[in-house]
Image (cartoon, grey):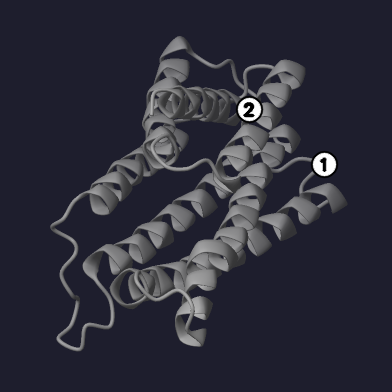
């Protein structure tokens, strides 16, 4: 559990950094004199890399030697996790570059072929790739916890730390979804929220079930409340 708390703490820190990076103005400068990217774009790519590495270590921490290890179900969810990692990485590579080009060159030009393609990659294709990868990675973590349940009694202090870390993720979800037009992202969070609470109900108080249930329901309810007050 100590390692799980540390890895979830990394995700909490990254949720804060993503919000600061996205909402602040100090990252709008250019990385190099050739102005190929802004710091906000490069930072998002690097933050996502650290987040995915931490999720990989979380996955390895959940898994342990059991008859289920390397079985067909385990291998299937490993494959889902790997494909999800690829799609998430590809989406960041596509989105951060085209988002920068969109904001700099195509805000007033939505009809030229170049800007039409840039806008589609920024607002549509990169989002589809990200949401698909996001669902796959996080669903894999949830179902790997289902295959490899925590075998010791979960202490009250462990539950408290899980809920604390889930608070940061939930607030991060709300900060990113609550103040914009509702899109596919809200439905993705709703899908994972329903899935996590179902597993919590069926399999009991497992660390990842508690963490994801609290985080996604907080993010979902907070986002809907923020949308209602807009």
Using the rendered view, name the quadrant where residue 37 is placed. Answer: bottom left
Q: Quadrant of the C terminus?
A: top left
Helix, strand or loop status at disc 2:
loop
The residue sitting at 59% across, 67% down in the picture is 125
Instruction: Look at the picture and state if 131 lies above or below 161.
Output: below
In the displayed structure, 168 sits above or below 120; it is above
Can you tell which quarter of the image residue 63 is in?
A: top right
Residue lying farthest to the bottom in this orientation = 34
Direction right: furthest residue: 72
Q: Count the numbered circles shown.
A: 2
Q: Residue 63: in sight, yes or no?
A: no
Query: Would residue 182 be found to the left or right of residue 133 on screen?
Result: left
Which of these two is toward me, 124 or 155? 124
- Assess disc 1: are there few (<14), some (14-19) or many (≥20) residues with their C-alpha within 10 Å of its C-alpha: few
Measured as percent of width and height from the top left, residue 130 is found at 56, 58
Image coordinates of residue 109 in percent, x first then y, are 39, 76
Note whether residue 116 is visible.
Answer: yes
Question: Image point 53% across, 54% down: which residue?
Answer: 56
Determine whether the residue tagged by mark 1 lies in a helix, strand or loop: loop
* Residue at 62 percent of width and 33 percent of height: 190
Q: Which residue is mark 1?
A: 67
Q: Is residue 100 left or right of residue 158?
A: left
Across and down, in percent, residue 33 comes to: 14, 86
Q: Earlier in the sequence, mark 1 or mark 2?
A: 1
The circle drawn on residue 150 is 2
Residue 67 falls left or right of residue 54: right
Q: CA distance from mark 1 to mark 2?
A: 15 Å
Q: Is residue 73 above or below residue 97?
A: above
Q: Which mark is residue 173?
A: none
Q: Crowding near pointer 2: few (<14 within 10 Å), some, many (20+)?
A: some
Do the numbered discs 1 and 2 sit on residues whose CB atoms are within 8 Å? Answer: no
């Amino acid at each position: 559990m100590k390692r799980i708390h540390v890895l979830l703490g990394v995700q909490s820190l990254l949720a804060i950094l993503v919000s600061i990076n996205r909402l602040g103005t100090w990252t709008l400068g250019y990385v190099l004199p050739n102005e190929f990217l802004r710091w906000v774009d490069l930072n998002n790519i690097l933050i996502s890399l650290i987040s995915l590495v931490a999720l990989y270590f979380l996955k390895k921490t959940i898994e342990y030697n059991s008859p289920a290890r390397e079985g067909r179900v385990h291998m299937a969810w490993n494959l889902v996790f790997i494909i999800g990692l690829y799609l998430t990485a590809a989406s960041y590579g596509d989105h951060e570059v085209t988002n920068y080009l969109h904001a700099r060159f195509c805000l007033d030009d939505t009809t030229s072929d170049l800007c039409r393609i840039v806008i589609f990659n920024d607002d549509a294709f990169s989002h589809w790739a990200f949401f698909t990868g996001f669902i796959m990675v996080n669903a894999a973590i949830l179902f790997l916890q289902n295959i490899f349940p925590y075998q010791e009694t979960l202490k009250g202090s462990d539950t408290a730390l899980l809920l604390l870390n889930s608070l940061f993720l939930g607030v991060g979800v709300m900060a990113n979804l609550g103040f914009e037009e509702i899109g596919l992202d809200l439905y993705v969070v709703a899908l994972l929220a329903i899935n996590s609470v179902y597993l919590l109900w069926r399999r009991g108080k497992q660390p990842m079930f508690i963490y994801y249930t609290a985080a996604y329901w907080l993010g979902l309810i907070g986002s809907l409340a923020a949308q209602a007050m807009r």
